[in-house]
Image (cartoon, rainbow, N blue to C red):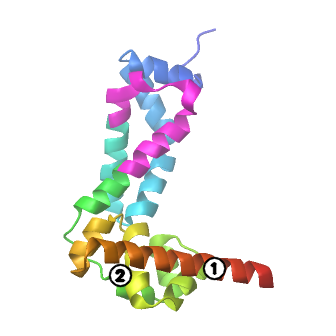
Amino acid sequence: MKVTRSELDDDALMRAIALGDSGALVAFIHRFQSRVHGLALRIVGDPGLAEEVTQDAFLRVWRRASTYDSRRGRVASWLLTITHHLAIDAIRLRRDLPVDPAAFLTLPIEAAEYRYQIDKSLQKQLQALPADQARPIVLVAFFGLTAKEIADREGIPLGTAKTRLRRGLARMRQSLRDSATLA
């Protein structure tokens, strides 16, 4: 009895792709397309951009299949990590839709949860922080900016940006501890 590509396990499919089997790539795409596109869409929030990220992820698999090492993790984990990195890079490169982090903090919780897939307690914690501490956290966590990029954007010294991040995160951490103690 002959085994079809769609019946191969993930590792065998990767080995076939590494050998240049385009049919194995097609089977691989069918197997993982919805998960990859779903992750990309959750991160970038734009269906068109998510489609580009999805295509780039599968192209990267095709080109780098020989670098996959099953001893380091599962195929799905490797693929979703690639997708995550590509999606974050896409957000960083996409400067045509400037977003004010202060606007994020004032969105109704339902809208923020839909767009950024965060929970209500996290948004409430961010809203409780002083704006100069909340803004850098939002810029790092949701827009992938570095401390240097935040300093440039805010027109403040790098050390100040780092201090605001550290203090904001410390306040959120303490607030989480306090709420866990009360529960």
- The type of residue carrying mark 2 is Pro
Relative horizontal placement of residue 163, taking residue 1 as reference (left or right): left
Identify the element where label 1 is drawn.
Answer: helix
Which residue is depicted at the point 23% across and 76% down?
153
Q: Is residue 46 magenta?
A: no
Identify the element where label 2 is drawn.
Answer: helix
- Image height check: is 161 above or below 72? below
- Image height check: is 146 above or below 160? above
Nearest the eye: 178 or 55: 178
Residue picked out by circle 1: 174
Which residue is depicted at the point 58% across and 33% down?
74
- Image height check: is 140 above or below 127? above
- The type of residue carrying mark 1 is Gln
Q: Where, by quadrant of the figure, is residue 177 drawn?
A: bottom right
Label drawn at residue 10: none
Main SS of the magenta segment? Answer: helix
- Position of the N terminus, as image quadrant, is top right
Which region is colored magenta?
Answer: 60-85
Residue picked out by circle 2: 101
Nearest the eye: 179 or 155: 155
Q: Are marks 2 and 1 in contact (CB under 8 Å)?
A: no
